[in-house]
Image (cartoon, helix red, strand yellow):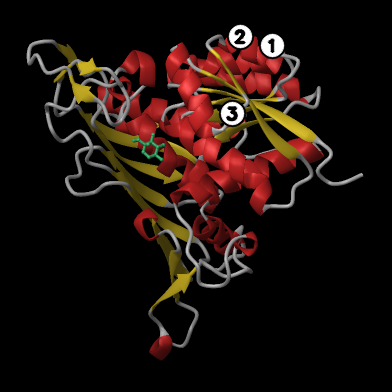
Amino acid sequence: MSTHDKVLRVGMVGYAFMGAAHSQAWRTVNRVYDLPARVRMALICGRDEPKVAAAADRLGWDGHTTDWRRLVESDEIDVVDICTPGDSHCEIAIAALAAGKHVLCEKPLANTVEEARQMATAAAAARAGGIRAMCGFNYRRVPAVSMMRQFIADGRLGEIRHVRAAYLQDWIIDPQFPLVWRLQKDKAGSGALGDIGAHIIDLTQYVTGQRITGVSALTETFVKERPLPAGSSGLAAQADGNGRATGEVTVDDAAVFVARLDGGALATYEASRFATGRKNALRVEINGSLGTLAFDLERLNELEFYDATRPTAEQGFTRILVTEGDHPYMSAWWPPGHIIGYEHSFTHQMRDFVEAVATGADPTPSFTDALQVQLVLDAVTRSAELATWTEVEPALA
Ligand code: SOE
């Protein structure tokens, strides 16, 4: 039997930015990696029939539907990929798990801790029946980030003292930028905090293997009213142009917080959509007793390493170019030294997910891992509201 005899028929809900990123990865994954199953891009779902039909054609899906329930209940689907705004993650994921489908869900897992807990409980129950669920924190799969985790797990940094993380964007600095769904609490759950802060919370907990145990936070909404959008309500939206109709921004524009990790480290986090000039600047630095690692998404093929165990005269930051065949995920791509980009993190994510589903392994981050991130998001929100230090409970008591 060929390794490709097993087929995973994917149904994806949503077709905007994340839908396009996931489609590219589903399409590419078997072309690059030798996997125990072959992916078929079977069905894509969206509410607007002409738009979802066009998306199916453009992104390479066999069929389309406007009914997500039909998709999750179909006998011709094995995997449900959820790329919708956060307000529908919980309902779709739980229905898909109940219908015996493996689930990949975009981050943040949900809009509230309560929803995330329901999803983690449903995933744990489905696991007993061989069903797998994973949350899409794609930056874990940037090779330099995987390598950071490996260095720390191998003890190369010694005791972790500091975690310094920032995720900075500037796409809404113009007060005339419209009130897209990412700026509405009922759809997105929170603002910069859940959209990009969730990435650095997950990434730092992942690379250090430590859990955030408490936070003290500040959040701010700098522009409180915005024009209503005309047409698209995604990142490329335009204001409706009549200059009158506005609505309230109900999420944070920025969140900053300090935290403690359970291994003893002190941490600082900053997530902002008002960092003028910073487009997609995710930066993480970890200082340990034996060295430092630093990563910057805008230079994602590089990892900076300071090895304090070297002779003093030779110490200094080394720039490691993470492009070689013995670096994580890289052997299947290009000859040595040939760099990769943003979209590769999604292909790597699909590789790991397909492999886990096909072999019955547990993919990570699990819904419980993602619930842990949700608990931090919730603690940050409460801390900012009450202006007080706030403990973060463990997802698994
Ligand atoms: C928009 O802020 C966004 O696309 C996030 O939603 C993604 O998760 C992040 O990877 C880039 O920025």
Q: CA gap, disc 2 to disc 3?
A: 18 Å
Say which of 319 and 316 sits in front: 319
User: Which residue carries the number 3 mark?
Assistant: 61
Question: What is the quadrant of residue 196 in the picture?
Answer: top left
**Side (left or right) of 286 relative to 225:** right
Mark 3 is on which residue type?
A: Trp
User: Which residue carries the number 1 mark?
Assistant: 73
Q: Earlier in the sequence, mark 2 or mark 3?
A: 3
Provide residue 193's location: percent of width, then percent of height.
34, 32
For the question of whether residue 289 can be seen, the reply is yes
User: Which residue carries the number 2 mark?
Assistant: 69
Label 2 lies in ligand 1 vicinity (Cβ under 8 Å): no
* Closer mark to the observer between disc 2 and disc 3: 3
Which residue lies at the image location 35% right of the left edge and 56% below the top edge?
298
* Closer mark to the observer between disc 3 and disc 1: 3
**Side (left or right) of 74 relative to 45:** right
Q: CA gap, disc 1 to disc 2?
A: 6 Å
